[in-house]
Image: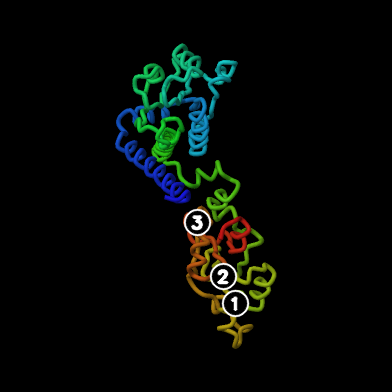
Amino acid sequence: MTASEKLLATARQVATDEARALEALADSFDERFVEAANLVLAATGRIIISGIGKSGHIGRKIAATLASTGTPAYFVHPAEASHGDLGMLSKGDVVVAISNSGEAPELANLLAFTRRFDIPLIGLSSKPDSTLMAQADVQLQIPAMGEACGYGIVPSNSTTLTLAMGDALAIAIMKHRDFRPENFRDFHPGGKLGAQLSKVSDLMHGGDALPVVAAATPMSDALIEISQKGFGVSGVTDAEGNLLGIITDGDLRRHMDGLLQKQADAVMTKDPTTIAPEALAAEAVAIMNQRKITCLFVVDPAKGHRAEGLLHIHDCLRAGLG
């Protein structure tokens, strides 16, 4: 076997070992997981995650995932906790302490503090008979699968399982609380994720920028509206502002003969495709791509068929959607 083949074989072995460990974790979930989730759901304060070494790195990610999915949480380093950060804990909080061995000495003061002040403690470890699990109110046990290195010295299977346990807890709680994409966006306003979770109402043009004309408007005036607003389109509304149709460049070409002697409702395309203001902008992009159009009028179903705004594909592209 060549050096390259050995590298690839090791990579596949590690991935296979961790996949098997995850399958074992999936089979291991029981009422203890439900008890842990209920403790978190009942917390009136925050969820405090703590761990040392690789467990600490995973703990930071678990805390971040909980916080971003509607469960206030933060990470407390156990060594710093012993030098004043225990003051960050209070009644109403729930502590999740992570240690694969369950014997990390750095956690001792944190565990003692939770016992002294009756703060619920969730232990996350692979060792059910460890000090951590003996102290914990609820034990989240990950399968003891060894490590993917084969020597038991490189945290791999254990850290993957710990991370998966944290993800399972965060997402189970998120779904229990009916935490939806629109809520998720409140915690992720920036970057690509923020763009993907933008609502139509965040990007649409409304008010005076909205190109609309009344049904009986002469086409000479409708053309001025289309030109001034700069979207190459105009909505046509009734007296209550309900959207009856739209006038596009294609409509103008189809009615070129005697165009200026016609009214807007004679030229418009009836019942155009619309979208609600609370819909995700990504959904609007999908509709525009599918129908090969460049804009959508925004209609709020709660207000009849009233034209609320206009979303152009360029607005979506500028926001990072495509």
Query: Can you give x and y, in whole percent of width and height, for residue 105 in the image?
Result: 48, 17
Numbered label tally? 3
Of residues 305 and 197, which is closer to you in this image? 197
The kind of residue on which mark 2 rests is Val
Q: Label 2's element?
A: strand
| Number of residues whose C-alpha sits closer than 10 Å to that of mark 3, classed few (under 14), some (14–19) or many (20 or more) | few
Instruction: Please state if 109 lies on the left or on the right of 227 as rendered.
Output: left
Residue 280 versus residue 242 in the image, above or below: above
Query: Label 1, label 3: how many angstroms apart (C-alpha)?
Result: 28 Å
The kind of residue on which mark 3 rests is Lys
Instruction: Please state if 72 lies on the left or on the right of 1 as rendered.
Output: right
Residue 15 figure quarter: top left
Looking at the rendered structure, which numbered label has been put on residue 236? 2
**Chain-order first, disc 1 or disc 3:** 1
**Chain-order first, disc 2 or disc 1:** 2
Query: In which quadrant will I find the C terminus?
Result: bottom right
Looking at the rendered structure, which numbered label has been put on residue 303? 3
Of residues 124 and 242, which is closer to you in this image? 124
Query: Can you give x and y, in whole percent of width and height, for residue 242 in the image?
Result: 52, 64
Residue 169 figure quarter: top left
Residue 234 figure quarter: bottom right
Of residues 56 and 228, which is closer to you in this image? 56
**Residue most toward the bottom?**
257
**Measuring 44% from the left and 47% from the top, which residue is drawn there?**
6
Query: Can you give x and y, in whole percent of width and height, for residue 124 in the image?
Result: 41, 27
| Number of residues whose C-alpha sits closer than 10 Å to that of mark 1, classed few (under 14), some (14–19) or many (20 or more) | few
Residue occupied by mark 1: 249
